[in-house]
DNA sequence: GTTTCTGCAAAGGTTTTGCAACAAA
DNA sequence: TTTGTTGCAAAACCTTTGCAGAAAC
């Protein structure tokens, strides 16, 4: 089973080729950093990780590469309700997942559910739209915080 | 049946009083502008509307009043996936509604659905959270655009 | 009279962009 | 060689904030 990272790298390469774009060592580094973990990250998070590998890569290049990775379908922007844009490296593996965001502790939990997917379909059609880029976001509160008065994710 | 605007004004007044805050003509104008329509708006949208009523109101005051209106429960921040924060004046009337956002034409449609509310509850609990500030956001594509090749909301 | 508010302008933080030098193909 | 890329610094945006004067209570 190939590492997700390799899969991503291959996909990016064919995207670049098909668009007449170039492979550079900066893009290599960015993709390596982006798929190093399965956590969501912001552009600045990624910049930090990238610079651990190669400290000469510029902020602008990270932002530009990010746009490329989204365009090529390797990353998805997710709206976690924070000020910054976040990126999700897990859509390659689980194209249908959704996010639950805890308003207390900022935890983000990914989930899949066939019932909600179906319902979403129905509602979407009923309203005259076309269910395509499925994306449901649930906001909730922290059970742990409510019961224990505290939560391991702080705040 | 009282106008929503009056209801909002009354609620704000008691909030201000209870917090030892003051009623000012600027806050009057902001609330008037905020509840003039049932559309979602950004801070800059609101500033424009406010200035049509009183052109001397500053940007800072609009931002500060907006925070106050959210705190007092009159407005809700909604995340429409755009760069700016948007505000929804319809939660006073329909505290349970959700949003469908068209990724093609940026249309926002509000909807309520008991089934999805229930499912959301289940999923939230199953994941160890507490369903509180219900908020589901569905992103979809435009049927009109797909079928006709164009859409009345442009883009 | 106090204390809160306001307007202004400056500052903050994230993301984008123009441009000259550089590197991939 | 040609054309796309990079790094830098500046710019662009939205939003927040410090402060002195103005306005509520």
Image (cartoon, coloured by chain):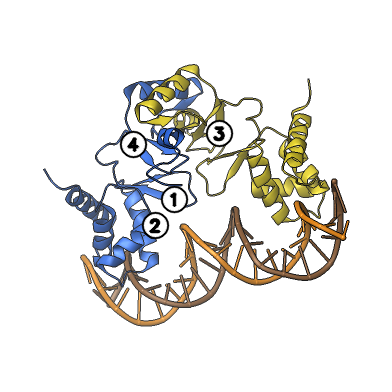
Chain colours: A yellow, B blue, C brown, D orange
| Residue mark closest to the camera, 3 vs 4 | 4
Viewer-proximal residue among A149 and A133: A133
Q: Quadrant of the N terminus of chain B?
A: top left
Q: At 68% across and 32% down in the image, what residue appears?
A: A38
Quick one: label 1, few (<14), some, or many (20+) residues within 10 Å?
Answer: some
Which of the marked residues, 2 or 4, is nearer the chain's N terminus?
A: 2
| Residue mark closest to the camera, 2 vs 4 | 4
Q: Chain of mark 4?
A: B
Q: Chain of mark 2?
A: B
- x, y (%) of residue B20? 28, 58
* Residue A146: mark in rendering: none
- x, y (%) of residue B28? 23, 61
* CA distance separating discs 3 and 4: 25 Å
Q: Are marks 1 and 3 in contact (CB under 8 Å)?
A: no
Viewer-proximal residue among C16 and A43: C16
Residue beneath disc 3: A108
- x, y (%) of residue A94? 62, 25
Residue beneath disc 1: B85
Secondary structure under badge 3? strand
Quick one: label 2, few (<14), some, or many (20+) residues within 10 Å?
Answer: some
Residue beneath disc 2: B43
Residue beneath disc 4: B110
Q: Are marks 2 and 1 in contact (CB under 8 Å)?
A: yes
Q: Chain of mark 3?
A: A
Which of the marked residues, 1 or 4, is nearer the chain's N terminus?
A: 1
Q: Taking A23 as reference, is D22 left or right?
A: left
């Amino acid at each position: 089973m190939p590492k997700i990272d390799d899969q991503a790298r291959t996909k990016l390469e064919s995207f670049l080729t098909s668009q007449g774009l170039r492979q550079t060592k900066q893009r290599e580094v960015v993709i390596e950093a982006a798929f190093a973990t399965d956590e969501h990250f912001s552009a600045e998070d990624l910049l930090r990780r990238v610079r651990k590998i190669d400290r000469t890569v510029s902020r602008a290049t990270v932002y530009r590469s990010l746009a490329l990775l989204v365009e090529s379908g390797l990353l998805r922007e997710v709206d976690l309700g924070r000020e910054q844009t976040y990126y999700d490296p897990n859509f390659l593996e689980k194209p249908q997942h959704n996010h639950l965001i805890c308003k207390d502790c900022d935890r983000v939990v990914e989930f899949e559910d066939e019932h909600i997917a179906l319902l979403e379909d129905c509602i979407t059609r009923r309203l005259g739209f076309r269910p395509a880029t499925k994306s449901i976001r649930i906001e909730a509160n922290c059970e742990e915080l409510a019961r224990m008065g505290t939560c391991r994710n702080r705040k």
